[in-house]
Amino acid sequence: MPRLEGKTAIITGAASGIGRASAIRFAAEGARVIAADVADEVRATCAEIEGSGGVAKAFVLDTSEKANVDTLVSVAKDDFGGVDVMFANAGIGGDFLFLDDLEAEHWAAVLKVNLIGVFIAVKAASMAMKEKGSGGSIICTASVAGLRASAGPSPYSASKAGVISLVQTASNQLVGTGVRVNAICPGLIETGMTKPMFDMAREVGKEDRIGQLNPLKRAGQPSEIAEVALFLASDESSYLNGQAIAVDGGLSSSLPFMPGRLA
């Protein structure tokens, strides 16, 4: 039996990268997918799902706006009977600026999408799940940048640390409801957001250095994050709650060290 048979999943940021890979993977396991993104390419994601015999609905909208997320939840309830899975994945990187060059506007723009947008998704989905009464799984995309410094710009890193805290507090405030809330903390993954970095490395012949700081010595692919999201969406993770899971090739498991030396 498919792992998400009979479940309805809302996935934000589904036009590319992790969101797209997850939408396609969820659908392949039987989920009815409601995919949203500000980019029109989300329609292509749903077209691929439908072309493979799956069920998907595409929405081009900004999921950092409450009314838009409410629309997604309403569609899930009206067309499919409710929400079983929410994957709050939409996010932006922001500008790579040092502290002295950052302004409040930089922070506000990143926090609105990466943290407030995730809060809106968590609240809307949890309310729908409680109304349905059969529990559910909420998955949020955080980052290793939310666990340690130097993995991203300051506003981005702070927003992802906020997502981890939101997951912890929300999972405890939903006590007794059967609604689980967890975060995935990707490391270096080749997505639309990181594409400039990958392109630059390849142009100067340094592709072999991508991901060199983690024990696997490589970057990850969106499909590898999608597999973890699938596990969290499925009943296989029924006792996993309030956790931030690093999927980073081992990057966050160690302090900096010299390869080949014990100390």
Image (spheres, helix red, strand yellow):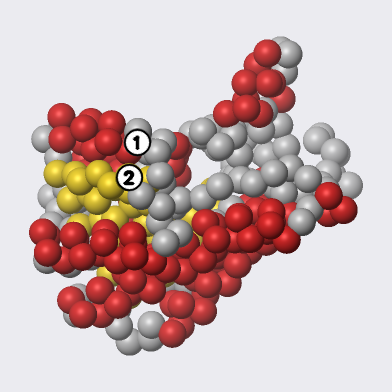
Q: Secondary structure at mark 1?
A: loop
Which disc is residue 40 wearing? 1
Q: Residue at x 12, y 60 (%)?
A: 80
* Residue type (three-letter) at the residue carrying disc 2: Val
The answer to whether residue 156 shows anywhere in this view is: yes
The disc label shown at residue 8, or none:
none
Residue name at image x 23 percent, y 31 percent:
48
What residue is rendered at 69% in x and 44% in y?
95
Residue 125 drawn at (x, y percent): 32, 69
Q: State yes or no: discs 1 and 2 in contact (Cβ < 8 Å).
A: yes
Horizontal placement of 235 versus 183: left or right? Answer: left
Q: CA distance from mark 1 to mark 2?
A: 6 Å
Q: Residues within 10 Å of mark 1 (few under 14, many from 20)?
A: some
Name which of mark 1 and mark 2 comes first in the sequence. 1
Amino acid at pointer 1? Asp
Asked whether, in this view, residue 201 is left or right of residue 21, the answer is right
Judged from the image, the secondary structure of the residue bearing numbered disc 2 is strand
In the rendered image of this protein, does residue 129 appear above or below residue 9? below
* Front one among 199 and 232: 199
Where residue 84 appears, as percent x and y from the top left, is 24, 64
How many residues crowd around disc 2 within 10 Å: few (fewer than 14), some, or many (20 or more)?
Answer: some
* Residue 27, above or below 239: above
Task: Please name the residue that numbered disc 2 is placed on.
Answer: 60
Residue 60 position in % (x across, y down): 32, 45
